[in-house]
Image (tube, rainbow, N blue to C red):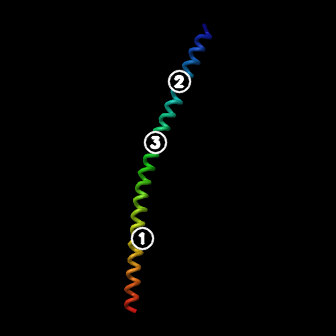
Amino acid sequence: MLTSYELLFCVFVQILTAGICIGVYKSTVAFMQQEIAELKQDMRKYNNVLERLIHVEDSVQSAHKRIDTIEEIRY
């Protein structure tokens, strides 16, 4: 009789342990998915800044060319 209680207790502990492991795994996956979504959003913002910076650099480059031509005409 004692062995059947021990067996039931062992089965209960194993089921409980498996449930805890599955719960930790699911919460970790959910956390990582949330972090990945935030990183994607940050990357989109960063890419937008890079596109704007490239546009500004092109504008500055063309402005410098115009200034150089104006200086050549003056002198």
Taking 11 as reference, is 28 above or below it?
below
Q: Amino acid at mark 1?
A: Glu
Residue drawn at (47%, 41%) of the image? 31
- 16 vs 49: above or below: above
The residue located at (51%, 26%) in the rendering is 19
Q: Residue furthest right?
A: 3
SS state under label 1: helix
Q: Callout 3: helix, strand or loop? A: helix
Rendered location of residue 39, percent (x, y): 45, 50
Which label's residue is closer to the chain start, 1 or 2?
Answer: 2
At label 2, the amino acid type is: Leu
Callout 1 crowding tier (Cα within 10 Å): few <14, some 14–19, many ≥20:
few
Residue placed under numbered mark 1 in the picture: 57
In space, the residues marked 1 and 2 are separated at their CA atoms by 61 Å
Distance between the alpha carbons at the discs numbered 2 and 3: 26 Å
Give the quadrant of residue 73. Answer: bottom left
Residue at image mark 3: 33
Which residue, given by chain and number where applicable, does mark 2 sit on? 16
Chain-order first, disc 2 or disc 3: 2
Q: Is residue 67 above or below residue 29?
A: below
